[in-house]
Image (tube, grey):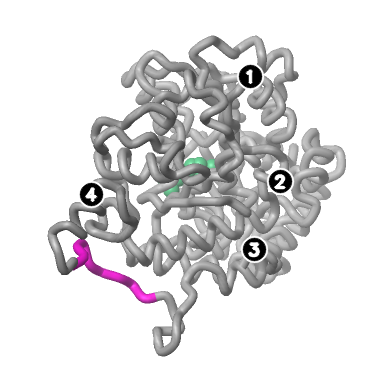
Amino acid sequence: MSNYNIETKCVQSGWQPKNGEPRVLPIIQSTTFKYESSDEMGALFDLEKSGYFYSRLQNPTNDYVAQKICDLEGGCAAMLLSSGQAANFYATFNICEAGDHMISSSAIYGGTFNLFGVTMKKLGIECTFIDPDASEEEIEAAIRPNTKLIFGETIANPALTILDIEKFANVAHRHGMPLIVDNTFATPVNCRPFEWGADIVTHSTTKYMDGHAVALGGCIVDSGNFDWEAHADRYPGLTTPDESYHGIIYTKKFGRAAYITKATSQLMRDLGSMQSPQNAFLLNLGLESLALRVRKHCENADKVAEYLNNNDKVAWVNYAGLPGNRYYDLARKYMPDGICGVISFGLKGGRDTAVKFMDSLKLVAIVTHVADARTSVLHPASHTHRQMTDEQLIEAGVQPDLIRLSVGIENADDIIADIEQALTDI
Ligand SMILES: *Cc1c(COP(=O)(O)O)cnc(C)c1O
């Protein structure tokens, strides 16, 4: 499928039925798989043969969907997980252990910030957060002898900063470590981080990929480009014998698939954050229309951002598609065809006005979600961050008046009309 365009891959990649098989990806709703001989089953457990034996590690439905996402990103191996949180945990923990260090952009999803800054710290892994706009020298200054990776989000949720992927990849590679990019908001329709030097990509498939707000999920895709063997001392988990598999060495046995094979056979085996095949089926349906939907989200977001920008009740608009936005040039470079459907803005009048505005919306709904077909809105100061004072909010990088608008795929005129009627009331 690698020669096809992205729209074709969205529809056709992954499941390839043979003669007489179902046209549509089947849900293999089975925890177990049957074998004729004990030896055959034994060989699977030793990773001597590839095949399915237990759905906590691998399931065919999931693998076909992972293959589709792998094709979309232009990667070499991929795996599905139960959530985006699980994807970012596995992606980093696969090459970090107690005593190690990692670097992350500070402009990332709140859940990931907590995972890296609090939970992984309890496992003995330290994370230094750096400014997403840090210079190469500033990124380099954060690198330590035990640093294993650099992490960032293509488009940060909710800050909407754009990562200069090439810059971060150059620094990472100069110091012999991979760049991991969470590409959830851009999706491979708008940006393929491997083309800019990223080594590993993660996704919360819960967002645009599913697109209908029905199935939690995550994905990790490996480009296969990072040379673990060239930095063998830094990545012993990949380059020295794994005692839990009779001493196999992942890089020696699996080559470019080493990283994903280790994450599946070790982390998935021991931690078990598997996506259900039912969810993978729903995700696959979402992926079929991903390219169509993402284009419509972007087209609508452009119109809504322009409307807000020209409205005198609006204090500010943050959307990298607007000329004058601080990330406009980076967005043009990495996402020339569109950014994403998420916009943030503030109203004159601040926090209380934001609440009044949101309560007056009729079509646009207040929900704790982004990036699905329905336009939705969230006010962090009243919802996700409601325990904080205005001063604490500003310290955390969330303006008290910030409204996050996830523009859906309805008719843009109807979305704008709803915003307009709500603005007349305030
Ligand atoms: C939502 C989100 C996550 C977490 O994904 P879940 O599927 O909710 O676990 C991670 N990264 C980004 C950028 C997200 O938007």
First-in-chain label (2 vs 3): 3
Label 4, on which residue?
45
Label 2, on which residue?
195
Residue 34, image x, y percentages: 18, 67
Residue at horizontal 63 percent and vertical 54 percent from the top: 74
Q: Is residue 398 visible?
A: no
Please state which of the two labelled residues, at mark 2 or mark 3, is closer to the viewer.
3
First-in-chain label (2 vs 1): 1
The circle drawn on residue 175 is: 1
Please state which of the two labelled residues, at mark 1 or mark 4, is closer to the viewer.
4
What's drawn in magenta, residue-wise? 26-34
Q: How far apart are the two marked residues, 3 and 1, measured between alpha carbons?
A: 31 Å
Direction bottom: furthest residue: 20
In depth, the one of 227 and 112 nearer the eye is 227
Identify which amino acid the numbered label 3 is placed on: Ser
Identify which amino acid the numbered label 4 is placed on: Phe
Disc 1 crowd rating (10 Å Cα; few below 14, some 14-19, many 20+) is some
Please state which of the two labelled residues, at mark 4 or mark 2, is closer to the viewer.
4
Please state which of the two labelled residues, at mark 4 or mark 3, is closer to the viewer.
4
Location of residue 415 (image quadrant): bottom right
Identify which amino acid the numbered label 1 is placed on: His
Say if mark 3 contacts mark 1, CB within 8 Å: no
